[in-house]
Amino acid sequence: MTEPSSRLCTHKEMLLKVRNWQAEGKKVVFTNGCFDILHAGHVRYLSAARGLGDRLVIGLNTDASVRRLKGPKRPLASEHDRAEVLTALAAVDAVTLFDEDTPEALIGMLLPDILVKGADWPVEKIAGATAVLQHGGSVLTVPLLEGRSTTGIIETIVQLYCPKQTVG
């Protein structure tokens, strides 16, 4: 089994891994996200994504990117901690950080065989979908585990421990 620390890659290292796997005839699946507080919904989602191919690679939003997308109070876990947790999962073969608001440029560089997002995303709104489809790949969605979200977990914590506070 590959050590988790060797699964965290620069973009160039990720590109080399993806091309090598593809040259071996492996189907490479790409997904992305913030993965701020890893929960059962994430784990099931990543397992389902991995089940669609032979290798699963993740584009992980940097802390700055998460703040722009989710607000100044996020992320709760640093990009290094989030990457360490993701690389420790058996379903995950490699993780790379990206600082942009979307992983479109990263996906366009990697050109995975399969691009995956949660079923709450319409395919036409998935960043990088056009590049993957034009390169002969597939864009798929997988069902999400009902009632599981990082925001929901945060809201529960605030309600239980800080009832006069609001999430925002």
Image (tube, rainbow, N blue to C red):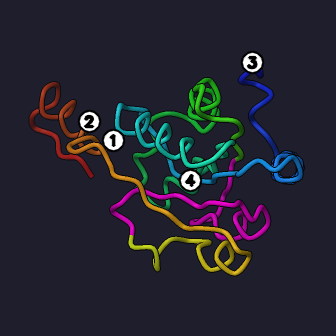
Indicate the quadrant where residue 1 lies: top right
Residue beneath disc 2: 153
* CA separation in Å, label 3 and label 4: 23 Å
Q: Name the residue under label 4.
A: 32
Q: What residue type is labelled 2?
A: Ile
> Residue 36, image x and y in percent?
46, 39
First in sequence, mark 4 or 1: give its number.
Answer: 4
Whole-number angstrom distance, CA of label 2 to CA of label 3: 32 Å
Marks 2 and 4, the one that precedes in the sequence: 4
Rounded to the nearest angstrom, the CA distance separating label 4 from label 1 is 15 Å
Amino acid marked by disc 4? Asn
Classify mark 2: residues with Cα within 10 Å, few (<14), some (14-19) or many (20+): some
| Tag of residue 23 | none
In the displayed structure image, the side of residue 55 where residue 69 appears, left or right: left
User: Residue flagged by tag 1: what amino acid is it?
Assistant: Thr
Q: Is mark 4 on a helix, strand or loop?
A: strand
Tell me if label 2 and label 3 are in contact, CB under 8 Å: no
Q: What element carries label 2?
A: helix
Return the residue nearer the eye: 118 or 63. 118
Q: Earlier in the sequence, mark 3 or mark 4?
A: 3
Residue position marked by numbered label 1 in the rendering: 150
